[in-house]
Image (cartoon, grey):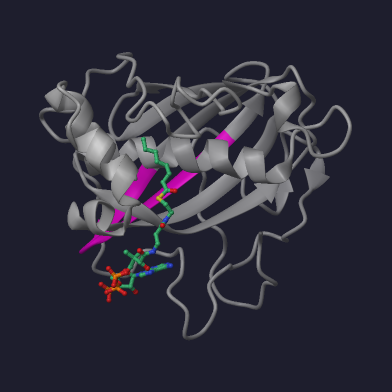
Amino acid sequence: MSAPVKGGERRRKIPGTNGHTAGKDPAEGRVSRVSGATTDSPGRPGLTPPPDAGPPVRHPAAPAPGEPLGAHYDLCFGCGGGQPHGLHVRSYAGEGVTVTAEFTVQPAHQGAPGLAHGGILVSALDETLGSVNWLLQAIAVTGRLETDFVRPVPVGTTLHLRAECTAVAGRKIYSSAVGRIGSPDGPVAVRADAVFIRVKVEHFTKNGRPDEVKVAMTDPDARKVARAFEVNP
Ligand SMILES: CCCCCCCC(=O)SCCNC(=O)CCNC(=O)[C@H](O)C(C)(C)COP(=O)(O)OP(=O)(O)OC[C@H]1O[C@@H](n2cnc3c(N)ncnc32)[C@H](O)[C@@H]1OP(=O)(O)O
């Protein structure tokens, strides 16, 4: 997914990596595919917060640290219980504007024999990063997400993810995530930087297929209705 890199900023610090960048990762003793350089391109909105960006502010109504976030929508591929081959990511509110999550790679998630498909890993990152917006109580969608695949992830592995919002600028929400193998302190397998864009609820109600939108909107559980549309389509 990463675009070729040309000049510019160094990659931002990624939460949970003790300040390691995508270049040399001392914990891993290897140099990653992108050599610790920028991913922003001239003329294309990038992953670097602008100078007027501010720190994210945890919403007073955000779930308490440690509280499970649950599935925001039963048919969400990332977290929904109603998707047999979905990821069934389990997310928990963290301190500040952070989220931790777990995802166990199933046989249905393979790319190469016995290994997780890269797009599946991106989906797990996207899900975890998107969950962070719930702590801001912001309705937002992924605008851009760039991933470093650091090491292969075998089927059966539980990936421990951690995502953190790093900055907010107008409608733009900047976040980073890391996924580790086997435990929260395990070896880094994937990292991602993303920018989410705040949208109105009509983004979902107008663009979603009417059949699913109607069913979701008529759910008797008002909280489920709110979460289905306020966090993710
Ligand atoms: C628990 C929940 C888990 C959820 C996890 C999963 C989350 C998802 O995967 S969401 C689904 C995937 N994403 C989508 O479908 C989004 C599709 N894209 C869109 O709908 C639109 O392009 C959208 C809404 C992102 C932006 O369109 P629009 O509202 O017209 O915004 P626009 O006026 O162009 O831009 C607003 C700002 O965002 C910036 N921006 C827009 N797109 C991007 C982008 N791709 N990258 C970086 N910045 C961007 C613009 O530069 C602009 O910045 P500024 O305010 O400084 O000028």
Q: In which image quadrant can residue 25 be found?
A: top right
Task: Locate residue 97 relative to residue 218 in the image: left or right.
Answer: right
The one nearer the camera, 233 or 182, is 233
Residue 80: x %, y % from top left = 43, 26
- Whether residue 18 is visible here, answered yes or no, is no
The one nearer the camera, 2 or 156, is 156
Residue 101: x %, y % from top left = 48, 24
Could you tell me which quadrant the N terminus lies in? Answer: bottom right
Quarter, ligand 1? bottom left
Image point 27% across, 43% down: which residue?
A: 213
The one nearer the camera, 111 or 147, is 111
Image point 72% across, 60% down: which residue?
A: 34
- Whether residue 148 is visible here, answered yes or no, is yes
Image point 51% across, 52% down: which residue?
A: 193
Residue 152: x %, y % from top left = 80, 35
Could you tell me which quadrant the C terminus lies in? Answer: top left
State the predominant SS element of the stretch in magenta.
strand
User: Is-magenta flag for residue 11?
Assistant: no
Instruction: Please state the extent of the stretch shown in magenta in the rendering.
Output: 165-178
Task: Locate residue 226 relative to residue 177 in the image: left or right.
Answer: left
